[in-house]
Amino acid sequence: MKPLHFIQIILFIFLFLVPTTKVIALPAGYIIPKETLSPSQRYGFIVPVFDATVKDTSQFQNALIDTKTDQIITKVDAPVGFDRPLNYVSVERPLWSKDESFVLWKVNGKWCPTALVLIKLEGNKQRWQLNLLTAFQEKTLSYTKKAAPEKYETAKKATIGKGSSYPDGFTIDVVPVQSKNDAVLKLPLEIHVTLTSNPKNLENFPNLNAELDGIVKENGTIEVKKFKLL
Amino acid sequence: MKKFLFLVLFIAGQSTFSQSQKVVVDNDIQKEEIEISAALKQPEPIVEYGDNNTVSIYETLRIRKSNNQDHSIIQTESTSTSYYGTLKIDDDGSGFSHNDPNHNPHTWWQPNGQDLNADVDWYVVVPGYLQKRYGIKPGDRVEVTLYLSHLDLIPCGEPCDASDAQGTEFLDWYSLIYSANVGDIGPDDKGVGEVSVKVAKSMGFDISDVEGIGPISTWNGKDCAPVIKITYYPSEN
């Protein structure tokens, strides 16, 4: 073999056989929307591509992916968000801490998010995952029930027939105070919760309203700062 | 033999190279202006559609697409105010829940003490902030405008929330206008565009009930949520 041909073969190997970027083995039907990438683009979230043949969303999950190692770091343990808005359900741009060790994943819903999850990363692995939506909804329900047990039961009975987005029939919105304007997630994270039995202000309907303020610390613990019936 | 070896290496290289492209989708919609020749799409004849509807025909085929929020006010008159928003489907009231986790058996408007039925009643949902701003009351009259030419422009089956119309001329040569009432109220911080199942079906959309989401509008077998205009006529009393 002439030396020139040998060099040509080596060049071909480097040009075509050695991939220039790594292959991401995404599950079929999933994509990584650009807006879900972390500032360094090291991490991103996979979301399923919706099509009108889908009849049940419980078969889908979002997941955090390491774009460098091509590995799924963790699945998000919450209702899924798709690649496009569906009624009020839409994926919001995740909020990352400066060092990318925390990420707040949010899927918008009608009266409250359908998913609000804080994920702690350490060494490119999940340290823990906290469902802020359900955690703060349960806290608020517990405080409200303790503060006004009779009104709570009356309101709960009046809200029979509501869908699964209303725990015990109440409309409970959980809002990360910081994420409204800030581009960077900072811990401890302030959370504001509003609870109402009557979001439409219907006449002759039991009214029970409450507010709760709390924080999420860096170790994943929740602390309630203030609660009041309105 | 050498040529064969080169060919094999080349094909293998091409195959590997094509697989190496990352699957990252850019959902940012670039601001763009679409101009369509009038010669390509001639206005169709006036069509009567649904109850108490009128049809407006404009000759302008100029639509500017941008990635604005769907809260965009387009006009305020002394007797009415109009907003654009992407189509959303409401199933609240006495009817079927349509697998909607947000289903509420009660509607804001309860004529004769009875909740509306989204499957049979013509109504729209007013966002809480608009209700407060304009003093809109249950039962107030509204008009819902569907732009058929706009519908053609939206790639249904693709993410199609980006065609909102703040600051645009948004004149369509062919639209359908439906009369309805304000029947329900929505959250303070969400946009307009939510209509009852009945209104959506009357506009020609099919409804697909998705467990975990609720009813979504489809067009020709694909999910589709075009921008619609809702004009509110707040009553004085």
Image (cartoon, coloured by chain):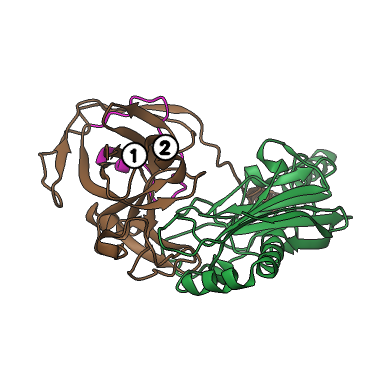
Q: Is residue A107 above or below residue B235?
A: below
Q: Secondary structure at mark 1?
A: helix
In the rendered image, residue B163 lying in the magenta stretch gets the answer yes
Q: Quadrant of residue B122?
A: bottom left
Q: Residue at x 30, y 56 (%)?
A: B220
Residues shaded magenta: B148-172
The kind of residue tagged 1 is Leu
What is the total number of numbered labels drawn onto the structure image? Answer: 2
Left or right for A107, reference B51: right
Q: Is residue A207 above or below residue B72?
A: below
Q: Horizontal and vertical percent for residue A52? A: 41, 61
Chain rendered green: A
Q: What's the chain of the residue with tag 2?
A: B
Residue, disc 1? B153
The kind of residue tagged 2 is Ser
Tell me which secondary structure the magenta stretch mostly adopts. Answer: loop
Q: Horizontal and vertical percent for residue B186? A: 44, 51
Q: Horizontal and vertical percent for residue B150? A: 31, 38
Q: Secondary structure at mark 2?
A: loop
Q: Residue at x 82, y 57 (%)?
A: A223
Q: Count residues near mark 2 (Cα–Cα under 10 Å), then give few for <14, some for 14-19, many for 20+.
A: many
Q: Is residue A44 above or below residue A184?
A: below
Q: Horizontal and vertical percent for residue A95? A: 72, 45
Cβ atoms under marks 1 and 2 closer than 8 Å: yes
Q: Is residue B46 visible?
A: yes
